[in-house]
Image: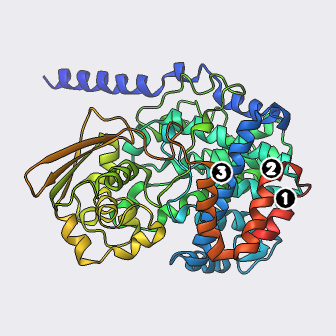
Amino acid sequence: MASGIADSSRASDAARAATVVDTAFEKVPVTKILAEFIDDLTYESIDPKVLEGLKELLLDYIGIGAFAASTIESSEPFHRAVLAFSANATGSCTVMTKGQQFSPQYAALLNAAYAHTLDFDDTFAAGALHPGAPVMSAALTQAEISGANGKALLTAIAAGYEVICRISRALGAGAYERGFHNTGTAGIFGATAAIMKIKGAGSAAIEAAFGLAVSKAAGSTQYLENGAWNKRLHPGFAAHDAFMCAAFVDQGILTASKPLEGIFGFLKGYSSSPNIDNMVDGLGKEWIHITTAIKPYPGCRMTHSAIDLAAKWRKEKSCLIKSLCLSLSPHCWMIVGRPLENKIHPKNIVDAQFSAYYQLATTWLDGNETGWRVYDRIHDSDVSELLDKITVEASNDLQPLAARLEIHWEDGTTSVDIERHPIGEPSNPLTHEQVLSKFSSLAIPTYGEPKSKRIIDVVSKLDQVLDTKELMSALA
């Protein structure tokens, strides 16, 4: 009997080992292909519409990051911490609103953290991540060091966005099931791609940098437990560590091969359901990052369909509501909809950013144009009363980012509506005027109107800029 159990156990262990050591996953050398794409990419090969889209994303990044740097409660502690562990080392790199005296890796860290702090930064739905914070921060800092022109900067940003989006899409929802935050984990590869492109590195060096990045990829979603600031720092760590990887590779260190597709590599290690099949399909011809959305609201993207529905229905009838029942996809429910105390009644801003309950309640009461002021209402009694009338359920028939809202009115009637594509997605995009309006609402309180207009002008003509320092001097 014992022998039979032992044999069964050994067979089970062998089966698990065979699953891990699945060399079929390595058949497509995606790391090498991505490195060659980065090396070969030229400004002239990028569709002008793609370049214009990247300018909008850059402007959005700047407005968000600058506002957060100058306003939000975590920003000054982040700044002080960097000064402390850098032993007040100085450099010549820019941090938004903080000056131009930072070392490259610390400038990138702070800019990326600030750009992610509001949870107002761009989102790539297919990869469930924010590409801009790590990629833009790394690209801008390296371009500032190198004196790169605007065309070189845009080319590097295009490379970084495409790499981070393709890697995150390959991770799939299985990354979140394992507790990883794609913005941090995949972020280092996008940041590294942008840095190496501006440095003029060849494909072998880029591949080597990825080979070290795989050992630095990090970002846990445990911040959801108590609304911690870890999340805000994740893209900062990614951008910082990308500079470390580039520096080590410059000195010729030996790094891991097959870091993405290897049997112990990034995709298998960081996702329970990675999909490598289409990771490099159409690379260089099809730009998947163009589906990146510019967000209309400062909160987790998984709450935005609920916000859109509440804004639509809040004034539909004159009678009061008895209750609201929101349905989300299982994946979104796991992140923003579980009936936990700090989601039903958020204790702090990060809690509220990841609470479908809170976003639905505040939109129902105040509309969807409050911007960052939405978080002034966390402890208000009328919000708390409405929160107790809301339930959130998981529904297998809903696609990611979709939401269904059942409104039970005091007159005994019920209304039901579905939002499948929240505002900002490619099928429901913000207009250029709305992008400019969002930027101005964040930049003008931070920089003032004249400097904000100057930034808009420089970004709009970035392909004519001879030195990225022209832009960075406006952001200091």
Please identify the residue farthest to the left as the structure is shown.
412
Up-down relation of residue 94 to residue 418 (above or below)? below
- Pointer 1 residue: 468
Q: In the rendered structure, find residue 153 and report the number of the disc placed on it.
A: 2
Question: Which percent across, then down, holds residue 449?
Answer: 71, 73
* Residue 318 as seen in the image, left or right of residue 192: left
Question: Which percent across, then down, holds residue 327?
Answer: 25, 44
How does the figure colour the protein chain or chains? rainbow
* Residue 466 as seen in the image, left or right of residue 295: right
Q: Amino acid at mark 1?
A: Thr
**CB within 8 Å, label 1 to label 2:** yes
- Pointer 3 residue: 57
Camera-nearest residue between 222 and 322: 322
Q: Earlier in the sequence, mark 1 or mark 2?
A: 2
Q: In the rendered structure, find residue 176 and report the number of the disc placed on it.
A: none
- Dot 3 crowding, Cα within 10 Å, few <14, some 14–19, many 20+: many
